[in-house]
């Protein structure tokens, strides 16, 4: 017999952004790495998990992104974010598509190439299998955390503070969030409904679910993986080149 429904896995891939710092009209996730768009590398990497469902949230250049995704992963599903209200809002767009799904949901970003690595995906999946009723995530240490949110302990609770909202002392922290989570579907939608735009950008931050889960009495478990800085986010042409270098090292 197959897995029980609550043990099944769906993956939500966030791929709605334009990526203005890339200085290109090409949707951010379609920028190539060694000849393959970032989104393609990620979708192929997800195969190691054998997910029951994969939902890609699109926005800028949606038709182009969706056509490419279908060519890589037949059967992939889509939800569109028609207005940019933050990463939490982007994940909310997938709720309707996954309304009948009762398993765990893994969330990854289409421009974070750590999510294409089998060891990182398997580590997060294994942690989620142990922490079936809570929120599980990955953390990474980087030499230069500039541009990333910082993971901090606040009152014994792990919280994510976006760089725009960090104090000078918090900016010195080198533990960053590679934005890879897994948690039960019902818990995800419950937590997202509580997210408020209480930040400089007035956006709904997905990262707020970490603190909200802890406040709800759910276990928040984190596993650290070894990662090079470019693997935790590609936002500029320079970072794209740096990621190419990482791929050459492991080839």
Image (cartoon, rainbow, N blue to C red):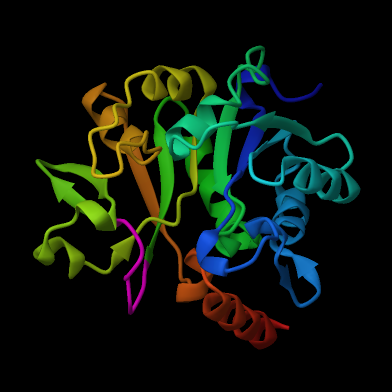
Q: Is residue 131 visible?
A: no
Residue 153 relative to residue 49: left or right: left
At x 58%, y 69%, the residue is 23
The residue positioned farthest toward the top in the image shown: 100
The answer to whether 212 is drawn above or below residue 63 in the figure is above
At x 33%, y 26%, the residue is 195
Question: Percent from the top left, x then y, of residue 111?
Answer: 59, 58
Residue 147 relative to residue 45: left or right: left
**Which residues, given as a range, are shown in magenta?**
141-150
Q: Nearer the viewer, residue 69 or 108?
A: 69
Q: Nearer the viewer, residue 25 or 238?
A: 25
Question: Percent from the top left, x then y, of residue 63?
Answer: 79, 41
Residue 189 relative to residue 80: left or right: left
At x 79%, y 24%, the residue is 2
At x 32%, y 70%, the residue is 145
Q: Could you say which quadrant of the image residue 246 lies in? A: bottom right
Q: Nearer the viewer, residue 72 or 137?
A: 72
Q: Quadrant of the N terminus?
A: top right
Q: Quadrant of the C terminus?
A: bottom right
Question: Percent from the top left, x then y, of residue 146?
Answer: 32, 71
Q: Could you say which quadrant of the image residue 244 lies in? A: bottom right
The answer to whether 103 is drawn above or below residue 9 in the figure is above
Q: How many marks?
A: 0
Q: Nearer the viewer, residue 3 or 87?
A: 87
């Amino acid at each position: 017999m197959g897995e029980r429904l609550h043990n099944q896995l769906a993956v939500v891939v966030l791929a709605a952004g334009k990526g203005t710092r890339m200085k290109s009209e090409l949707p951010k996730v379609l920028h190539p790495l060694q000849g393959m768009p970032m989104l393609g590398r990620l979708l192929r990497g997800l195969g190691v998990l054998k997910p029951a469902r994969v939902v890609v949230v699109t926005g800028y250049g949606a038709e182009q992104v969706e056509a490419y995704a279908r060519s890589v992963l037949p059967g992939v599903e889509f939800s569109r974010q028609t207005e940019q209200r933050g990463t939490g809002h982007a994940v909310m767009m997938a709720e309707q598509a996954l309304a009948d799904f009762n398993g765990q949901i893994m969330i990854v970003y289409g421009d974070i190439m750590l999510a294409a690595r089998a060891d990182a995906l398997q580590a997060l999946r294994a942690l989620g299998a142990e922490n079936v009723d809570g929120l599980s995530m990955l953390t990474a240490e980087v030499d230069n955390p500039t541009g990333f949110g910082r993971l901090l302990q606040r009152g014994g609770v792990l919280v994510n503070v976006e760089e725009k909202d960090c104090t000078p002392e918090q900016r010195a922290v080198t533990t960053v969030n590679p934005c890879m989570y897994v948690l039960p579907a019902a818990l995800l939608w419950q937590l997202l409904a509580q997210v408020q735009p209480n930040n400089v950008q007035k956006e709904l931050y997905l990262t707020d679910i970490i603190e909200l889960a802890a406040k709800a009495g759910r276990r928040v478990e984190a596993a650290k993986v070894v990662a090079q800085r470019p693997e935790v986010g590609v936002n500029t042409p320079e970072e794209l080149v740096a990621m190419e270098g990482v791929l050459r090292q492991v080839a």
